Image (cartoon, rainbow, N blue to C red):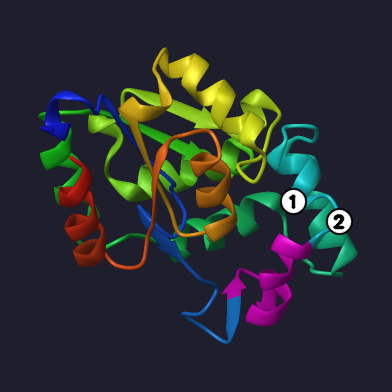
Amino acid sequence: MNMKKVIDWIIFDVSGVLTQFTFGNSDEYSIGNARVNTSQLEKIYKDPQYRAYMLGDISHKDFVKGFLAHEHIDMSVEQFDRIFLSELEPMPGMKDLVRSLSTTYSIAVASNEGSVLSEFRMEASGVMPYVAKRINSCDIKLLKSDSAFFQKMLEILNSKPEKCVFIDDDEINVKAAKSCGIHAIIFDTPAQLDTELKRIV
């Protein structure tokens, strides 16, 4: 069977697939009089309010402000955002791959992220011109580890599971997609992804 006539949508995770990110370019960051070490900033993903932020239950300003206060970091939300943006980079090779795929398939992104950090990541990815739909956890109030996320995604895309390919670097999210009948690939490298995509599309 020629799968090129079957697949309509290719859906990408953003962080770890379209962008790469780490507070690892410096042992310490300094903006004006504000200084903070890398290990402190990395705790943001373990912050008790991060899940609420991903689900859209807390604003970006309140989330970051609460995190900075909890970690006793003397820095404004705006200063944190500047550091976060400085650490975001497009995943090498992915922009060209997405652009190539977009000539044949509809492209969507699906992410577990709050609104502002999601925007930062998308801007850094460089793929915005090729993306037809965006499904964010903060908008639909579901996380990708829940199969209900993918049921909602199919509804938004107005598509069927067998007509979609989902790509993520987290095995839990890939398993949730597969449980809904969606073709799903665990991302490792752009070259590996290209090889696996060719088996499907």
The magenta region covers 30-46
12 to 40, vertically: above or below: above
> Could you tell whether 134 is left or right of 71 in the image?
left
Q: Position of residue 93 (x, y in %)?
A: 19, 60
At a point 63% along the width and 36% down the height, the residue shown is 147
Going by the numbered disc 1, the residue's amino acid type is Val
> Could you tell whether 128 is left or right of 78 in the image?
left
Q: Which mark is residue 48?
A: 2
At a point 79% along the width and 36% down the height, the residue shown is 58
Q: For mark 2, give the secondary structure.
A: loop
Q: Position of residue 177 (x, y in %)?
A: 51, 40
Q: Position of residue 116 (x, y in %)?
A: 58, 39
Q: Does the magenta run of residues contain 41?
A: yes
Circle 1 residue: 64
Asked where in the image residue 42 lies, by quadrant, the reply is bottom right
117 to 161, vertically: above or below: below
- Which quadrant is home to the N terminus? top left
Q: Earlier in the sequence, mark 1 or mark 2?
A: 2
Q: State the residue in front, 191 or 40.
A: 191
Q: Does the magenta run of residues contain 45?
A: yes
> Could you tell whether 192 is left or right of 179 in the image?
left
- The residue sitting at the front extreme is 1
Q: Which mark is residue 17?
A: none
Pointer 1 local density, CA inside 10 Å: few below 14, some 14–19, many at least 20 = many
Pointer 2 local density, CA inside 10 Å: few below 14, some 14–19, many at least 20 = few
Going by the numbered disc 2, the residue's amino acid type is Pro
